[in-house]
Image (spheres, rainbow, N blue to C red):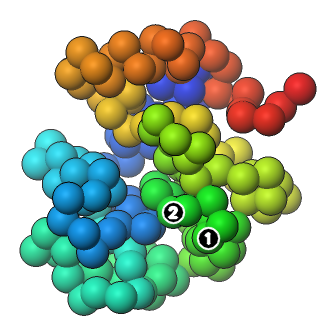
Amino acid sequence: MATSMRDAGREFLARGRFALVGASRDGKSFSRYVLRELVRRGYDVVPVNPSVAELEGRRCFPRVQDITPPVGAALLMTPPARTSDAVGDCLAAGVRHVWMHRGTGPGAATPEAIARCRAAGVEPIVDLCPFMALPDAGWFHRLHGRLRGVHRRPATVVQGDV
């Protein structure tokens, strides 16, 4: 069981295959950078975006429910206004491991999306960027993680908890 947000992220990544929901059409976007880097590192990342058929040479699916073969985990890089719907799609697809990305901005997590996961028995990862969970991330990502406290913060504490 994960003892910190970073540990929870590492457990998620150890699954090896997962959806990246909200992969952008814009090749210069951060979500595309994440997609490229995770694929380069050997992860089987399945992009999800209803507007495109392929990203970075990988088949792109309109919804998590459409992915074949199915995935058991999903990294959500969606705008907060779309995260709850993305969580609903993940849960309908049987996904039991949800990570709501957060970089330097507000991130994907919303109270509604977190509650929706928890109501289904899924404890989401929040307030964490995938680069903070990679053991050999660059200095900037390590510093960012330290400033956020992801190395020591319990995995069950989320943005907005009292």
Give, as a three-letter code, the residue at label 1: Arg
At 59% from the left and 44% from the top, the residue drawn is: 106
Answer whether labels 2 and 1 touch (C-beta < 8 Å): yes
Q: Is residue 96 left or right of residue 35?
A: right
Residue 43 visible: no
Location of residue 84 by image quarter: bottom right
Q: Position of residue 121 (x, y in %)?
A: 77, 54
Q: Is residue 117 left or right of residue 105?
A: right
Question: Which residue was labeled with disc 1?
Answer: 82
Task: Indicate whether 1 appears above or below 75.
Answer: above
Q: How many marks?
A: 2
Q: Position of residue 98 (x, y in %)?
A: 57, 54
Give, as a three-letter code, the residue at label 2: Thr
Q: Position of residue 67 (x, y in %)?
A: 39, 81
SS assignment at label 2: loop
Q: Is residue 128 left or right of residue 134?
A: right
Question: Which residue was labeled with disc 2?
Answer: 78
At 30% from the left and 29% from the top, the residue drawn is: 134
Q: Is residue 75 left or right of residue 38?
A: right
Give the label on residue 45, or none: none
Residue 62 visible: yes
